[in-house]
């Protein structure tokens, strides 16, 4: 029995997604050139990765002349929300406080980042009070 496809992007797929969120649609060659700024990859490897991502529903593929161009099916915010929800459920049994405690310990945020986190919590609380 085949394993179900994992729709959660792998680290390599997230690298491609970051590129496509910034500049899409792009051809295989354009994605490869941008990826190769960090680490060399073969054209066929990038093409295979984009095809797998399309099969997983992460990317849309459109014909463009004799080639295809690719773009993300979901925006960055929606994708990050899905990844975070998956991590929250699988690793932290749904406990936001446990996840935040581990995040703070691991990330060791600067004073500026902590101030931004406090602002975000305040905005969240105000929005939550406003909507019930």
Image: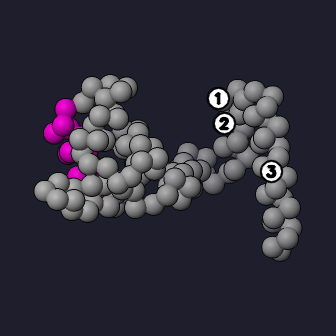
Identify the mark nearer the N-term, 1 or 3: 1
Residues packed near mark 1 inside 10 Å, few (<14), some (14 to 19) or many (20 plus) = few
Name which residue lies at 13% across and 56% down: 66
Determine which quarter of the picture holds residue 45. top left
From the image, tell me which residue sits under label 3: 121
Disc 1 + disc 2, Cβ < 8 Å: yes
25 or 79: which is nearer to us?
Answer: 25
Q: Is residue 43 magenta?
A: yes
What distance separates the C-alpha of mark 1 from that of mark 2? 5 Å
Residue receiving disc 2: 103
Q: Position of residue 103 (x, y in %)?
A: 66, 36
Which residues make up the magenta segment?
A: 42-56
Q: Which of the pair 31/116 is nearer the observer?
A: 31
Nearer-N-terminus badge (3/2): 2
Q: Which mark is residue 21?
A: none
Which quadrant of the figure contains the C terminus? bottom right
Please tell me how crowded label 3 is: few (under 14), some (14-19), or many (20+) other residues with Cα within 10 Å: few
57 relative to 102 in the view: left or right: left
**Which residue is farthest front?**
65
Neighbourhood count class around disc 2 (C-alpha, 10 Å): few under 14, some 14–19, many 20 upward: few
Per the image, the residue denoted by label 1 is 106
Residue 58 is drawn in which quadrant? bottom left
**Residue 48 falls left or right of residue 31:** left
**Magenta stretch secondary structure, dominant:** helix
Instruction: Check the picture and name the quadrant holding the N terminus.
Output: bottom left
How did the renderer colour the structure?
one colour
Residue 97 or residue 1, whichever sits in front: 97
């Amino acid at each position: 029995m085949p394993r179900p496809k994992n729709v959660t992007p792998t680290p390599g797929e997230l690298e491609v997604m970051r590129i496509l969120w910034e500049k899409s649609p792009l051809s295989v060659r354009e994605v490869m050139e941008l990826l190769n700024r960090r680490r060399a990859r073969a054209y066929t490897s990038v093409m295979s990765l984009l095809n797998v991502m399309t099969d997983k529903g992460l990317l849309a593929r459109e014909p463009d002349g004799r080639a295809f161009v690719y773009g993300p099916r979901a925006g960055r915010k929606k994708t990050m929300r899905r990844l975070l929800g998956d991590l929250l459920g699988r690793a932290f049994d749904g406990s936001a406080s446990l996840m935040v405690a581990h995040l703070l310990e691991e990330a060791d945020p600067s004073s500026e980042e902590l101030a931004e986190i406090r602002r975000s919590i305040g905005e969240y609380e105000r929005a939550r009070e406003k909507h019930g």
